[in-house]
Image: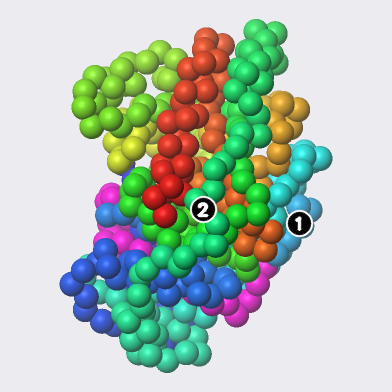
Amino acid sequence: MSHLLIGVAHVIFAPMNQQRSTARRHVADLALVKRQVLFHASKFRYSICLDNNFHKDVFAGGTCELLAGIGHTDLIEALPGQAFDMLKKHRDQHADWLFGGLSYDLKAETENLHSSLPDSVGFPALCFFRPETVVLVQAGQLLVHCLTADPEAVCDEILSTQTVFSPASTPPPVLQPRMPREAYLDTVRAIIGHIQEGDLYEMNLCQEFYAENVIIDPPGVYSKLNEIAQPPMAAFFRFNNNYLLCASPERFLRLQGNRLVSQPIKGTRRHTGSHDENLKSELANSTKDRAENVMIVDLARNDLARSCQPGSVRVEELFGIYSFRTVHQMISTVSGIILPHTSPVDAIARAFPPGSMTGAPKVMAMKLIEKYEKNRRGLYSGAVGYFDPAGNFDFNVVIRSLLYNADTGYLSAQVGGAVVYDSVPESEYDECMVKAEALFRSLASS
């Protein structure tokens, strides 16, 4: 089973872009160094830190614990229309690292589905940067690769960085629901009606909790969120003054060599610390959760088949139960061998947006999402990750996340779940609250 976002250890010792100079330091406390990289990176207007929280990755065979892109040489921002073409053109011209995010709103490009819902966070639909500095923490080492900066000086700066919260000028924000509980329950009932009418089999319904005119310390809140949840595909992403603080456990899509891997999640239980074996057994044997999961697995198989060699797509694991700090999850793994001469960007576009965040059939689910949800998802339900110099990539699914616009003070937390034929509206709402708990706790703690 593969969960790790940063499976690129082999690239460190392979030929890299020769423009980059390298420094290496031995470090004893990897957890401390990872926090230092985070707080150092957060000072730059364009930066990203991808943290696996010491979860292992059998597919990559690597030991990389954190990967960061810091500063920028090139920026790619695009609205839906030619966004994926712009990304592909840049990848064709620069065989180097590239970090960034794909908004759920790019569905307008992949499926010609547009949104008129409000977007208060303001992340670009596609936002990538080619970093000045790439930092890796692995196997007791800090490795720094720079285009123009002195890597030894960057190492010194990282290792002297203080990892302390900045004081906020407002009390901890209290998030209010965009969709009141009774309205959410009514919406679930309406979606069940669509399922009974045969319009679709499953739909992922999301709701937003938000606050306005607040000031938070993004690296501090993210550090607390990451400590609480310790997920395998965490991400801190700053793009100008927009921030993503992401505690995702889910992989959208990864290319390693010629192998594409997707790992959809459907099925959640609270991690209580007591009686958890009963909760895990309940999740493993839940007819409803297994039905949700297998429908999205079929969708992932179809999405991968569009870019993979005929007959190569297979289910590596079905209904795997994995435990994290706050939740137990049902995760399946689907893989395939990518067709020769297929662009990595095309493989992403053909599977986008992540099926676990839409439903089945995919297009109908997205049409109903537009009808019933109250705000645009933006980067939430999209994907964040990287391309490496060899053309490999790895992207998570942006869930369990806080989105923050530092210019306006708008703070957003969206959570959701799959609605199927036998869904109980009250239980669906409770599942949303389980997923949101770590987000609320991170704000209160910081």
Q: Nearer the viewer, residue 307 or 151?
A: 151
Name the residue carrying label 2.
171
What residue range appears in magenta?
55-76
Residue found at the far left of this picture: 28
Report helix, strand or loop for mark 2: loop
Q: Position of residue 317 (x, y in %)?
A: 34, 32
| Amino acid, disc 1 | Leu
Residue 430 highlighted magenta (yes or no) = no
Report helix, strand or loop for mark 1: loop
Name the residue carrying label 1.
79
Task: Select label 2 or label 1 by which is in front.
Answer: 2
Residue 73 highlighted magenta (yes or no) = yes
Label 2 or label 1, whichever comes before in sequence order: 1
Quadrant, the C terminus: bottom left
| Amino acid, disc 2 | Pro
Q: Position of residue 441 (x, y in %)?
A: 41, 43
Is 155 drawn above or below residue 139 in the view shown?
below
Q: Quadrant of residue 191?
A: top right
Q: Position of residue 362 (x, y in %)?
A: 65, 30
Q: Quadrant of residue 53?
A: bottom left
Q: Nearer the viewer, residue 105 or 175?
A: 175
Residue occupying the point 76% across, 52% down: 80
Q: How is the image coloured?
A: rainbow
